Structures are given as structure tokens and as C-alpha cells.
Amino acid sequence: MYRILEKKVLGPQVTKMVIDAPAVAKKAEPGQFIIFRIDEKGERVPLTIADYDREAGTVTIIFQIVGKTTTQLNELNAGDSLLDFVGPLGTASHFDENVKKVAVIGGGLGTAIAYPQAKKLFHMGKEVDAIIGFRNKDLIILEDEMRQNSTNLFVVTDDGSNGNQGFVTDALKKQIEAGANYDLVIAIGPLIMMKFVCQLTKQYGIKTIVSMNPVMIDGTGMCGGCRVTVGGKTKFACVDGPDFDGHEVDFDEAMRRQQMYKTEEAESLRDHKC
Ligand code: FES
């Protein structure tokens, strides 16, 4: 059993939990994920590792309450336990030593996944511009953490309620046109956001890494549930990713696949609430 040591509400629908999982913490790297199961009848749900502390033996997860299982997870509190917490899974992000200046972009909950990437690059001595975007100011998460782990931080909101209206693509374009000269862009967030970031960076010829988060079942490359098309080839996000070259990803197909189980997911959540 994996004990929940800490629970903190980060926003209206976003919760952070620190889990006692020494074996996972020992090997975790940015970009990797875990699969948890609440109990023996529970659904297996992948979550990207938001942070880890090897000495304390803890792993931090940040999740959005969107369906039945995340609703159930959010009903648990510090002191409760999860049945399974398997990981670290996936291929860790690879950061090229030659990279000097990076833009790390987080959209909404994607900021929780972008955060360990920014932190690692910043501690490698890279110049990191963090650009994070949210629908409104009440949904902003990890602003302080991002500020502490980046050279410059830009926070934008769709409605401008934080005083800085715009999308992450607007902020990125502004920096590029001001001469930011990025060697690499890392974009993590909704598929549509990653698609538009990639369209922009392609125009400027800037290598761009995205993190794909499709439906997953086993998380070990056996079921094929997490397949994505990258460079015209089928890849499994759970073992070949979740990081991929964003200029090669078929985002339109990924968006179609993401909608496939919406009806079943809504029914499952409705049954849980009844
Ligand atoms: Fe089954 Fe990736 S989750 S192959």
C-alpha cells in the first residue's frame, strides 16, 4: 500500500498529493509517469510525476478532477493509501548538454508536468524561460515554484484576469521576435495548445518536445491503447514516450482518439455520483 502523506488543493479542480513511494522516488526522472489504482476494482490511471524527493522517498502527483477515478482519488486524504503506485514508467526526458536557452511551456494542468522539466534544466545551468497559461487567474498553479526554477517567468490568462491577457503562443512569439534565440522549446498541455506551439516553432525552426498523455492501460507497451502517430509511424506513448518531437506528431489523430471514450467516462462518473 502507498500512503498519502500530504494533500493540498491547488485550485478549484486541481489537487496535489505527496505519496510515500521510496522505490519509485529512487529512480524517477522528469518526463516519467506512474500508474495508480485505488483498490482492486479500480481503473488504472497514468499520472506524470510532478516532483520527487529521493531522500524522503516521496513522489508528488498533481491531478485534475475530471472523471470517476480522479473524483475517487480526491475523496482520499492524508493517511489513506492507494493499492498500486507503479513506476517510474516511460522514457525519461533527455536534455542535450549543448542546449543553452530553453522555453518551457505549460498549459493548465500541463504546468504540473512542465515544472520538473524546468526545474531540472534550471539546475543544469540552462537559461529557462517558463511560459505558463491558464483560462483565468483562479486556475493558476505552481507560479511560485516555476518562478524559483526559471530565469524568467511569464504567466498569461485567456481572459486577462491576472493582468496579462493572451495565450502561451502569443507570449512565446513575443519572446522569439524580441530575439530570445531558443535552442529548444518544451510544450506540455492540452493537445490543441501543443499543436499550435509546434506550428509556431516550426516556422522559426526551433526543435520542440511535447509530452503526450493518451489513454493508457498496462503502461508497458503491450496493449496498444496509448498509440500515437509520430513521423508517420505508430509509437506507444508509454514506452517510446511520453516525450516526442512535436513537429512529427499527428495531433489531429490524437485529438480524435482522445474523444473516443467520452460517453463511457461520463457514464462512469455519473454512476459514481449516484
Ligand atoms: Fe498499453 Fe501503452 S498503455 S501499450
Image (cartoon, rainbow, N blue to C red):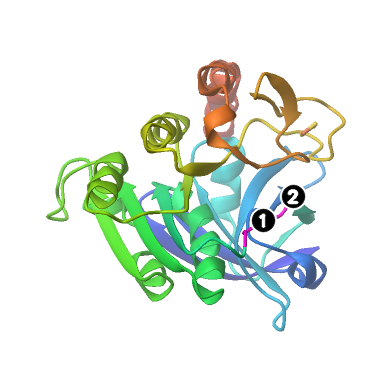
Instruction: Please tell me whether residue 213 is drawn above or below residue 85 in the rendered image.
Output: above
- Whether 93 is among the magenta residues is yes
**Quadrant assignment for ligand 1:** top right
Q: Could you tell me the amino acid type at mark 2?
A: Thr
Query: Residue at (51%, 43%) from the top-left corner?
Result: 207
Residue that protrudes farthest toward the left in the picture = 163
Label drawn at residue 91: 2
Label drawn at residue 94: 1
Instruction: Please tell me whether residue 161 is drawn above or below residue 194 in the rendered image.
Output: below
Callout 1 secondary element: loop
User: Which range of residues does the magenta coloring cover?
Assistant: 90-96
Asked whether the beta carbons under mark 1 and mark 2 sit within 8 Å of each other, the answer is yes
Is residue 75 something one can see in this rendering? yes
Residue that protrudes farthest toward the bottom in the picture = 55
Query: Residue at (40%, 29%) from the top-left corner?
Result: 199
Label drawn at residue 102: none
Total labels drawn:
2
Q: Could you tell me the amino acid type at mark 1?
A: His
- 14 or 151, which lies in front? 151
Q: Residues within 10 Å of mark 2 (few under 14, many from 20)?
A: some
**Where's residue 60, x and y in %?**
60, 65
Instruction: Please tell me whether residue 98 is drawn above or below residue 266 in the rendered image.
Output: below
**Where's residue 64, x and y in %?**
48, 46
- 223 or 150, which lies in front? 150
